[in-house]
Structure formats: structure tokens, C-alpha cells
Image (cartoon, rainbow, N blue to C red):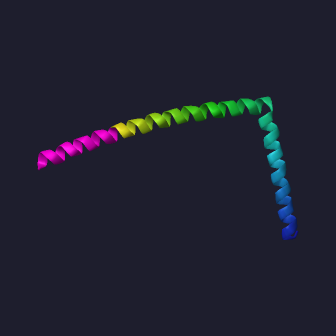
Amino acid sequence: MTNGTKTLLGFLAGIAVGAGAYAFLKSKKGQALKEDLKEKANEVKDELSTLVEKGKAKLQEWEQENSNTSTSNS
């Protein structure tokens, strides 16, 4: 098999996989999967936002503690 033939077969296989994925995602099961993934992504986003806010608050606490320590050591 030549390199051109292998490339063409790979390209055609990619098209077939893409078409299958598209057909699945358009089906009822695929729609349900997309909704589940979207819901889970929103949950993860919310959790990350909460963690970032907690991290910012903690950083501000440390900055205040360090600035108080620095001024009391002078």
C-alpha cells in the first residue's frame, strides 16, 4: 500500500467516525448525553469559581497578616 493510499484511507476513516459521532449526538441518547455533559460542566464551573473565590480570600488574609507582621517587626 502506498503512502497516498494510506492517507486516503485514514481520511475516509476520519469522515466515517465524524459522521457516526454526528449521528449519535443528534439521536435522543446523544441529546441526553450532551445535556448531561453540559450540566456537569456547569457544576464543575461553579465549583471552580467557588474555589477561586476562596483562594482569593485566603491570599488577601495572608497578605494582611504579612503586612501586619512586617510593620510590627520594624
Residue visible at 45% across and 33% down in the picture: 50
Q: Is residue 20 above or below residue 36?
A: below
**Which contiguous range is marked in magenta?**
58-74
Whole-percent x, y for residue 48 in the image: 49, 37
Q: Is residue 16 magenta?
A: no
Taking 12 as reference, is 59 above or below it?
Answer: above
How many circles with numbers are drawn on the protein?
0
Task: Give the percent coordinates (x, y) of residue 58.
Answer: 33, 39
The quarter of the image holding the N terminus is: bottom right
* Residue 11 found in image quarter: bottom right
Q: Residue at x 60, y 32 (%)?
A: 40
Q: Position of residue 52 (x, y in %)?
A: 43, 39
Name, please, the residue furthest toward the left.
74
Q: Residue at x 78, y 42 (%)?
A: 21
Task: Please give left or right for residue 24 compared with residue 38 in the image.
Answer: right
Q: Is residue 61 magenta?
A: yes
Residue 51, image quadrant: top left
Judging depth in this view, the residue of 23 and 73 nearest the camera is: 73
Foreground of the two, 2 or 18: 18
Considering the whole magenta stretch, tell me its main secondary structure: helix
| Residue drawn where x is 28% and y is 39% of the image | 61
Residue 34 locus on image (x, y percent): 70, 34
